[in-house]
Structure formats: structure tokens, C-alpha cells
Image (spheres, rainbow, N blue to C red):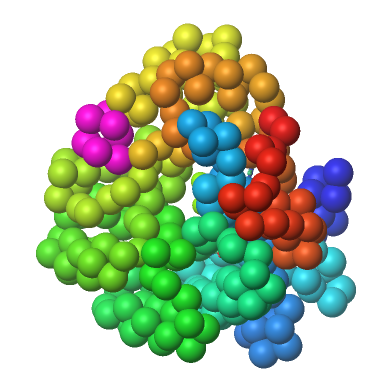
Amino acid sequence: RAKNQGRNRYAFYTRDLTANAHQRMEMENDMRRGLERGEFTLYYQPKFDLHAQQLNGMEALVRWQHPQRGMVEPDQFIPLAEETGLIVELGKHILELACLQLAEWRTQHLAPPRMAINVSGMQLIGNKLVSDIRRALETHDIPASLLELEITEDFVMNQNREAIHLLDIFSKMGIHLSIDDFGTGYSSLAYLKEMPLDTLKIDRSFVSGLPENHHDAAISQTIIVLAHNLGMSVVAEGVENAAQQALLTEQGCDTVQGYHISPPLPAEEFSQRFLQRAPSQRPSQPV
Ligand code: C2E
Ligand code: MG
Ligand code: MG
Ligand code: MG
């Protein structure tokens, strides 16, 4: 697998080694250069609606096409980008790339479903993201309802006024809000009643043990019931096989995402496989 190869070959970029100040600086400069040279690109992973049996969204996942190191995965540079603050600039670029891609597909009459982008806590400090998103949507003539933000529990846990205010703004704009990796943060559940959230994403660490592991099954079932009782929908991430999907369907899960449907794909491959025709004419996807 290219993914594993990448992990080994570019061990330079692992978390332990980034502790070395010199290497961190080198990589930070490298990232800045990469931003200027347009080395960052997005892959897209479909989200599959279990009720309607069709695509209902996609997630944009960043990749770094490094001239020497090849394709670098986000786990190897997002943590440092967050530590150094470069994530703010990188995040803005990712937003721009995502909107550009949506616009291109719309121009081609491909009717893309909602696009989710991952947002780091640091991007949510201050009101900068609001104006960036407003501008990006306007520039590319994209309705806010086509955009989804995946945020982590760490950001919402403090329940501070500013965080609630910011999410209220996004929500009122019509942007879909999801909690990513739900269940893995260090937060209480209290924030769930304060925030205008639409979706919980069950972390893949709870999905990987399905269907055999009874504890994982209890957790996924509980998250599904919790979300539904609070008026939210549920996405299970990291669904890798039919047995996992079958159990999640039985448990009432709304949407699945994972290698069983498709890994993240480059734009061209994604559109060929999933966006060929308008939704009304598309036969249901084989699962
Ligand atoms: P995430 O948002 O939870 O994204 C899901 C990750 O799980 C992705 O890894 C995806 O490729 C992987 N995945 C999807 N289906 C399966 C599956 O069936 N099995 C397994 N084992 N893995 C699966 P990826 O692309 O390496 O991204 C890792 C993390 O990096 C993301 O986790 C997200 O937290 C972060 N990330 C990715 N793109 C961005 C971005 O544009 N901005 C920010 N701030 N963070 C990003
Ligand atoms: Mg995500
Ligand atoms: Mg996730
Ligand atoms: Mg994750």
C-alpha cells in the first residue's frame, strides 16, 4: 500500500522527531514553500446514506505532494502546522481548494453533494474563519448548505461563549456542523445541548471492533441513540467491511464512510466514480 510506504519512507515527519527543533524549523519552512508552490491537494472520500442508499456527502482530506518526499499524509504535518500556527494559512488554502473544486463540478453540472472540510481548533479563534468562508462561498458562488465543517470535541468542550457564538453564526448561515472523532476527546457531554450541531461522527476506533466486539457495539449503539434523541444524525467513520456496515445499519446509523465504500480519491477519480450523473438519474451505488 502506498500509504504504508509513505509512512516508512517519510519517518522524518513523525511526531517524535518533530521534537527536534532544527527539523521542526526545516519542516515548517518546507510547508511554507509548499503552500507558495501549490503542493497541497485534496482527496475526497464519499459519505454513503444508509437510508437513501446513495451518496449524501464527501469529506475533503488534505495531502502534501512533496517534490522529494512524495505524497505526505496529514498525520505527518497537521500536528506541526497546528503547533506553529501555520494551520491558519493552510486551512484557508484548503477552504479555497474545496470551494474551487465544488465550483468546477457545478460548472460541469455534476451536482456534487455537501463537502466537509476539517477545521482545527486554532482556525476557530477569533472571527477570521467567518469572513474567509463568506468570501470563499461568494467568490465561487456556492450555497452555504453545500459546506460542512468537521470540528473536534477539544474545541467545543470549554463551552465558552465565543465558541458557541461562532458556531451559531455558521449554523445560521446554513453551514452543516459535525463533531469529528466523537467519543475520543476529553470532554463532557454538556456541550451537546449548547451547540447548534447537526451530526456526530463515530470515531473509527469504535468501528474497527465491529461486529464482534460487544463493547464497541454498545458504544456505537449508544452514540446513535444519543445523537437521534438530540435531533442529530450520525456518521460512522472507518467502515471497512460489509459486516460492520450491516451492524451499523441494524443499529440505525444514518451514514457510513470508509474503505468499504471507497478510500479518499483524487478529484478526477472521485467525480468519475461518484458524480457521473445528476443524483436523480444515477442508479443506486453497489455496496
Ligand atoms: P479524520 O478527519 O478523522 O479523517 C478520517 C481519516 O480516516 C482519514 O485519514 C481517512 O483517510 C481515514 N479513513 C477513511 N476511511 C477509513 C477506513 O475505512 N479505515 C481506516 N483505517 N482509515 C480510514 P487521513 O486522510 O490520513 O487524515 C487523518 C486526519 O488528518 C483526519 O482525520 C483529520 O483529523 C486530519 N486532516 C485531514 N485533512 C485535514 C484538513 O484539511 N485540515 C485539518 N485541519 N485536518 C485535516
Ligand atoms: Mg474529519
Ligand atoms: Mg474522524
Ligand atoms: Mg481522525
Position of residue 60 measured from the top left corner of the image (x, y, whole percent):
59, 61
Quarter occupied by residue 286: top right
Quadrant of the rendering where the N terminus is positioned: top right
**Height in image: 223 above or below 104?**
above
Determine whether, in the image, residue 18 is placed left or right of residue 224. Answer: right
Q: Position of residue 142 (x, y in %)?
A: 47, 76
Write down the quadrant of residue 200 in the picture.
Answer: top left
98 vs 115: above or below = below
Q: Position of residue 175 (x, y in %)?
A: 35, 64
Check the image and name the residue furthest to the front.
281
Q: Position of residue 46 (x, y in %)?
A: 62, 48
User: Residue 227 colored magenta?
Assistant: yes
75 in the magenta segment: no
Q: Is residue 74 visible?
A: no
Q: Is residue 250 above or below residue 195?
A: above
* Res 155 visible: yes
Q: Nearer the viewer, residue 250 or 200?
A: 250
What residue is rendered at 59% in x and 77% in y? 103
148 displayed left or right of 16: left
Is 51 in front, or is 18? 51
The front one of 116 and 52 is 52
Residue closest to the eye, 19 or 10 = 10
Q: Residue at x 50, y 22 (%)?
A: 249
In the rendered structure, which segment of residues is drawn in magenta? 226-232
Residue at the (36%, 77%) spot, across then down: 129
Residue lying at 59% horizontally and 61% vertically, measured from the top left: 112
